[in-house]
Amino acid sequence: MLDTIRQLIDKHARLPVKAETLAAGQDLYAAGLTSFAAVQLMLALEESFDIEFPERMLNRRSFATMESIAACIQELRPQAIAS
Amino acid sequence: MCEACPTLLDKLIHRGLLVETGIDGLYGRSGLFEQVIDGFDRLISRTGADQKAEVLRFPPGMNRVLFEKSGYLKSFPQLAGTIHSFGGSDKDHAALLDRLAEGQPWWDKQEMTDIVLTPAACYPLYPTAAKRGPLPEDGLIFDLNSYCFRHEPSKEPTRQQMFRMREYVRIGTPDQVVAFRQNWLERGQALIARLGLPFHVDVANDPFFGRAGRVMASSQRDLGLKFELLVPVNSEENPTACLSFNYHQDHFGTTWNIRTAAGETAHTACVGFGMERVAIALFRHHGLDVDKWPAEVRDALSL
């Protein structure tokens, strides 16, 4: 799943660095993620994993690290863990 | 609140301070109401005189292309107001008049013009400032005031669709801009205290549209980018934001490529004063009879 998240970050998060250089627990905002880009990333994640983030996940923290993103996806789609 | 009791809006209209137009949130103002607005406007000018801000006044419409570039539609499509005008032929004109006479929809030949309604007083400023090239060392401070439009019909007199917003806008380095906002957080509170209004300051978020907007709002709050000075007007539970203190970080600097003297992307911040909201808060707390307002309040407003 982290590989897919990394790909989506490279495509939508407009970071100055490649996602492969970032650790799963590293703060994406500190790496240059803007709020607008976080929203683009959120929409791309929803499409890619066929999920819809519920209200309680629509906040800054959900998209702060690849780990936190993965935790959200896992909660919404437990079977995604293998993908 | 009792159902039969007149609301604050009813009282303001009955007293003639606001004039009904048949549309919620769209009102005329009486001479006395305008005197209060003018008094508050002058009080702001006196409070901010030391800043030597450059005064700029834009009309309540802005260049549509610049508006499109500003990113407003990403965040607030539901609030935007666009201006359309008839673009048809003689035959279309005749059809328009027929439909009008029949009470039918008549606007199929209306075309988008090059002007949109200004959503916030500072929106026309950023592209104007950007055209001047890199900022001076001290950055820039502007003094703005404009009628603004937001499509949000409401029965609360404090939530109008066309209203005036006075602003001071700081463009500069992050340090300059953050210091400006901190300074105005303090000045704003002193100013409203002088007017004898109860208030508190709280972190806030803009009404970003949709599910994506929830993430934007959460970010804005977590980062403490927006504070509001709230006065209970319609109710204690839902006080009214009368002043707001906004740090945009590099959002406008990046959008418009505004550069500091050192060549960095400029940061911006603004303090906004809701002119009608403050006037209505004054009528709510000091009564509809301005002659009976506390002497120090009348004095502050030069009434």
Image (cartoon, rainbow, N blue to C red):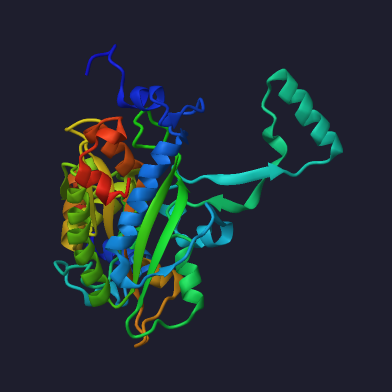
Q: Is residue B186 left or right of residue B117?
A: left
Q: How many marks?
A: 0
Give the residue displayed 42% in from the left and 42% down from the top: B34
Give the residue displayed 39% in from the left and 64% down from the top: B143
Residue A16 falls in image quadrant: bottom left
Rendered-image quadrant of the C terminus of chain B = top left
The spot of residue B141 in percent (x, y) is: 36, 71
Using the image as rendered, state which of residue B89 and residue B190 is in the foreground: B190
Rendered-image quadrant of the N terminus of chain B = top left
Using the image as rendered, state which of residue B59 and residue B191 is in the foreground: B191
Above or below: residue B29 compared with residue B204 = above
**Outermost top residue:** B4
Observer able to see residue B227: yes
Using the image as rendered, state which of residue A39 and residue A81 is in the foreground: A39
Q: Is residue B231 left or right of residue B276?
A: left
The spot of residue B126 in percent (x, y) is: 45, 67
The spot of residue A48 in percent (x, y) is: 35, 53
Q: Is residue B26 left or right of residue A35?
A: right
Using the image as rendered, state which of residue A6 and residue A61 is in the foreground: A61
